[in-house]
Each structure stands twice: as structure tokens, then as C-alpha cells.
């Protein structure tokens, strides 16, 4: 399935369109069945309002999150990397999107989500001495791939240039398969996998299915909004609901694909 078609289908199944479309359908239905149409509109609006509250969005996202990695011991300057490097290990950081033609930089660059992942990957690199692989392909109509913007940021912002650049993957499953193709020739089977905590369950499953021993290294945890602010709708809360439902949809899709393939 193409990137555009995948995005189109997801947009129809996820907020806000999954609430707006039924509301529009209810308005059309009111011409012939006023009560039923009004009930459909009301239900859609209530669901949209609930999905827009931090109480719902924060908790849905937090329910997906993997516990944090216990910090690896810091290595002494010039020391060899800690195990499991002896058996072949690396840090793999997954792209989380990019900013297209950012005017202040004059080119494509990493977005805030990807930058958050890169910061943690660079920290792990300094702690362990392990090499970094960046993974992310070409979104629609960009000059650079995600992996190339990640390479540039790691090099310029964190002084931690990656050893491998995987710039062809378009989803998490492809991240895993293409990372395996790059690392297997160097006998690397263990990876510190860096992505957002809410994305880690699906990412970990994909990398384990690709044959890796995965050490989950999640970042970007959700902060639970305290009451009574948790009941005030906001765009950020709706975004969190969208992300959480997209992840569950992605997990279900991956399981279905695995079942079909046998």
C-alpha cells in the first residue's frame, strides 16, 4: 500500500474525521429521520469532545508506553563499549518525521519528535560507545530522507555521527527489515531500539520478528494532566488520542498481516 493511500485510509478511521464524517451523515439523515439524525450528530460531537480532553488522550497514550530503560553504566573515556557490544550490538533510532523546507535552515530538517529520539540516542551512544544506525525513508515531496536529516542533526547538534544510514523504509516493519539487512553482515544481532514510548510495542515486535535481540530504549513519555484541567478539551489532547488510536490500529494491521502470511 502506498504512503498516500495508507495516510488516506488512516485519516478516515482516526480523529477528527472519524467523528466529523458521522456528524455530517447525521445532518444529512435529519432531512428524513430528524430524531435519528440528531442523535447521530450529538453522539459524534460528544465523542469528539471526549477525545479532545487530556483525561482521554493522555491516558490512551500512556497505556501504550513501555517502561523506561535502566540507564546503562557510563563507560570511561577511551574504554571499549560495554556488553552486549562484545556479541555485536548497535543503537537503532527510528525517524519520527521531518520538517519540510524549514525556512530558518533552508532545507528539510528533523521535527520535534525525531529530535527527541535523537537526543536520547546520542546520550546512549555516549554512555555505551555503541555505533548508531538511523532509519527513515522519503516522505512525500521532500528533498531529504528522514535518515539524512537525522544524520545531519546527530552530526551537527550532538557530535555523534551515525555509522549507518537506512533511507528507504516507509514504515516500522520496513525499518526493521532494512536495518537487519545492514547489520547482519557485521554480525550485529542486539540493538538498543530508540523510539517514542508509545511506539515501542509495535516497533519492538517488528524488530524481534526481523531477528533482533531488542533492548527497548523508549523516550518521550506522556505527562498526565492533573484535574480539573484534564477535562478541558485541547488540540494537543486530540492529537494524543489520534496517536494512540493510530498505534492500536497499526498493531492490529501488523497482526493481521502476520496471520495472513502464516
Image (cartoon, rainbow, N blue to C red):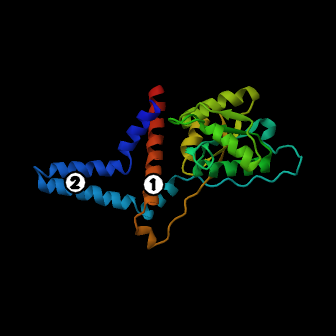
Residue marked by disc 2: 40
- Residue under the image location 62 percent in, 32 percent down: 167
* Front: mark 2 or 1: 1
Residue closer to the observer: 218 or 229:
229
Residue 185, image x and y in percent? 73, 26
Q: In the rendered image, which quarter is residue 223 located in?
A: bottom right
Residue 196 appears in the figure: no
Q: Secondary structure at mark 2?
A: helix
For the N terminus, the quadrant is top left
Q: In the rendered image, which quarter is residue 238 located in?
A: bottom left
Residue 6, image x and y in percent? 43, 36
Residue marked by disc 1: 239
- Residue under the image location 67 percent in, 48 percent down: 118
Q: Is residue 46 above or below residue 206?
A: below
Pointer 1 local density, CA inside 10 Å: few below 14, some 14–19, many at least 20? some
Inter-mark Cα distance, 2 to 1: 23 Å
Amino acid at each position: 500500500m502506498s504512503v498516500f493511500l495508507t495516510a488516506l485510509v488512516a485519516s478516515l478511521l482516526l480523529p477528527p474525521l472519524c467523528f466529523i464524517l458521522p456528524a455530517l451523515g447525521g445532518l444529512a439523515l435529519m432531512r428524513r429521520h430528524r430524531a435519528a439524525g440528531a442523535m447521530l450528530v450529538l453522539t459524534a460531537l460528544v465523542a469528539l469532545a471526549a477525545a479532545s480532553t487530556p483525561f482521554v488522550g493522555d491516558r490512551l497514550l500512556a497505556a501504550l508506553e513501555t517502561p523506561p530503560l535502566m540507564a546503562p553504566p557510563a563507560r570511561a573515556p577511551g574504554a571499549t563499549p560495554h556488553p552486549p557490544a562484545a556479541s555485536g550490538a548497535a543503537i537503532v533510532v527510528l525517524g519520527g518525521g521531518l520538517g519540510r523546507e524549514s525556512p530558518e535552515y533552508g532545507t528539510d530538517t528533523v521535527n520535534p519528535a525525531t529530535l527527541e529520539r535523537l537526543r536520547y540516542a546520542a546520550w546512549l551512544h555516549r554512555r555505551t560507545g555503541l555505533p548508531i544506525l538511523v532509519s527513515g525513508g522519503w516522505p512525500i515531496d521532500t528533498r531529504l530522507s528522514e535518515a539524512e536529516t537525522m544524520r545531519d542533526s546527530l552530526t551537527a547538534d550532538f557530535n555523534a555521527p551515525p555509522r549507518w544510514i537506512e533511507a528507504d523504509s516507509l514504515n516500522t516493519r520496513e525499518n526493521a527489515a532494512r536495518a537487519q539487512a545492514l547489520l547482519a553482515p557485521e554480525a550485529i544481532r542486539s540493538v538498543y531500539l530508540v523510539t517514542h514510548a508509545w511506539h515501542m510495542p509495535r516497533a519492538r515486535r517488528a524488530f524481534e520478528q526481523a531477528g533482533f535481540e531488542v533492548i527497548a530504549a523508549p523516550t518521550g513519555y506522556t505527562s498526565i494532566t492533573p484535574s480539573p484541567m484534564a477535562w478541558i478539551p485541547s488540540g494537543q489532547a486530540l492529537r494524543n488520542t489520534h496517536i494512540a488510536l493510530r498505534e492500536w490500529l497499526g498493531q492490529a494491521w501488523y497482526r493481521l498481516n502476520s496471520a495472513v502470511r502464516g
